[in-house]
Image (tube, grey):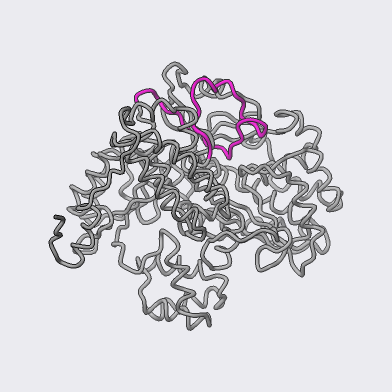
Amino acid sequence: MATSVQNIIEKYNKDKTRLMDILIDVQSERGHIPKATITQIANALDISHVDVEQTMSFYHFFSDKPTGKFAIYLNDSAVANMMGRQKVKETFENETGIKFGEVTPDGLIGLFDTACIGMNDQEPAALINGQVFTNLTPFRVKEIVRDIKAGRPLDDMFTAAYGDGENRNELIKSVVVNNIRKKGPILSEDYTPGIVIWKKLPQMSPEQVIDEIKKSNIRGRGGAGFPTGLKWEFCRKAQGEKKYIFCNADEGEPGTFKDRVILTERPKLLFEGMVIAGYAVGASEGIVYVRHEYKYLQKYLENLLQGARDRNLLGKDIGGIKGFDFDIRIQFGAGAYVCGEESALIESAEGKRGEPRDRPPFPVEKGYLDMPTVVNNVETLCAAVKVLLNGGDWYRNFGTKDSTGTKLLSVSGDCKYPGVYEVEWGFSVSDILEMVGADEKQVQAVQVGGPSGSIIAPNEFKRSVCFADLATGGSLIIIGHHRDILTDIVLNFTEFFIEESCGSCSTCRNIPYLMKNKLEKILDARGVKKDIDDLVAWGKILKVSRCGLGQTAGNPILTSIKNFRHLYDEKIQKDKDFDSAFDMSLAVKESCIAAGRIPTLN
């Protein structure tokens, strides 16, 4: 094992900033990262044992204990549960004889829960040794476990045909389907890869490129909506020996999967957008930070990058422009929602824990390796290509005055046609419900923007999806009247935020946990009116957290209280002003077990 680990370390030139890649390769090859291996890596990279261990312990898909020859990670998102996850989970446990979080005694199978894996349009779904299995049923689970025990190769366990489009590519071979329901300028097929690089860039100065992007008024598609041209301009003017372009493809927001589709069907468009950004700001290197759950696309994406190098779309003197040298590499994450925040993403790419940085300085001033860095969303970079191809004025014809262009929406939940829809900014929620085959009369609520967004009631369905009204990174989850909003959605999302907190801020580390306990008290019919008031007050404290995760961690509870207050009022005790719900025996239970004693409560 020591030799293979050393080979992995050598593959990355003993570069400590590539620690994530080293750990990912070791985990993939060995099924875990033993203590001795941590020491070996630390010595080879000339960093401390603690440096390696703190990075390893931060990410969900790293483990210092064996995860089984077949490591099964079952998505536990709200939509997965809506679509029958519980019976799938029970069948896995019955067929393997173990509980989730355990490995079979023979080391063959490990069962683990995991957050949304970007497959909400085809749930329940699971990752098995990195391969995606979608639309799981108890029957399919029995087949999978039977095949594992029989020693069949993983690829032979697929019983459905490969998915559509490039999912059938020899380098992917996945049963994932794209579910592209509506195409617009980004998803349209009228695009020739490299056309902007060869035809447009040689005729434009970097400043002219930035001016065209500014003219289009395109804003970031990751949720914050910062003007893209302004960000590029800041980075171009920043001082630094080297500059970087980062593509944030970490879409970890439960309910979001549009980037998965772009990475599968329009990756050349994305790469060209990064080249354009690199030319505009004077960068020489681009990094695509892709969430670990999409690692099944790695060979396919790496092959496309090599093809771009072969055609002079990457490398030296790109497009015949003397002195314009730019290349792209892919950096995978290892399971941490907080890495969707741009500074946490940069920290992770440097081989560290994905903890958000204090700002200022902003990444455009001091980002990756303390150099000026642009971080853009997948969709934003794709749109930049179309802006350069057709002009900023053309782009402004789509959408609204303040929200120009189109938006890719990931729609899932209680609807007939879940999938990806490219619509112009300004569509109402009612329009979208009609488009996706959801009877508005049967819809109780719509979660806009994932857990960090808002859950809205029918009286708000006429609101528009745009920066001036309902801004969203792209997720819409439709919730029917037969769902229990507080248990099925709000509690699930709150638990998600607790699990995904980096723990850096005391607010984010503690308050969501306290809010969850208070919510569970209300759900158990032990709550009083003051408990609802406490939830609202505590949620305000979260706003001082360092990053967006902490600041929005209370949103599932806060927006549901705002728009569905009656659900809380129905649960609380009407005849009480105070109920501590304190149970002494329960409070001392764990300490008694640890000490091996029987409590005396009298």
Looking at the image, residue 538 sits to the left or right of residue 464; the answer is left
Q: Determine the residue positioned at 65% across, 45% down.
A: 269
Q: Is residue 173 visible?
A: no
| Residue 515 on the magenta span | no
| Residue 459 on the magenta span | yes
Looking at the image, residue 37 sits to the left or right of residue 376; the answer is left
Vertical placement of residue 238 versus 573, above or below: below
Which span is picked out in magenta? Answer: 453-482
| Residue 60: image location, x then y, percent | 41, 58
Spot the residue most to the top.
441
| Residue 369: image location, x then y, percent | 66, 68
| Residue 487: image location, x then y, percent | 35, 36
Looking at the image, residue 340 sits to the left or right of residue 406; the answer is left
Q: Nearer the viewer, residue 73 or 547?
A: 547
Q: Nearer the viewer, residue 585 or 153?
A: 585
Q: Nearer the viewer, residue 337 or 146?
A: 337
Vertical placement of residue 94 versus 483, above or below: below
Vertical placement of residue 522 versus 193, above or below: above
Q: Quadrant of the image for the C terminus?
A: bottom left
Prevailing secondary structure class for the magenta stretch in the rendered image: loop
Looking at the image, residue 523 sits to the left or right of residue 354; the answer is left
| Residue 311: image location, x then y, percent | 69, 56
Q: Determine the residue positioned at 40% across, 50% down.
A: 513
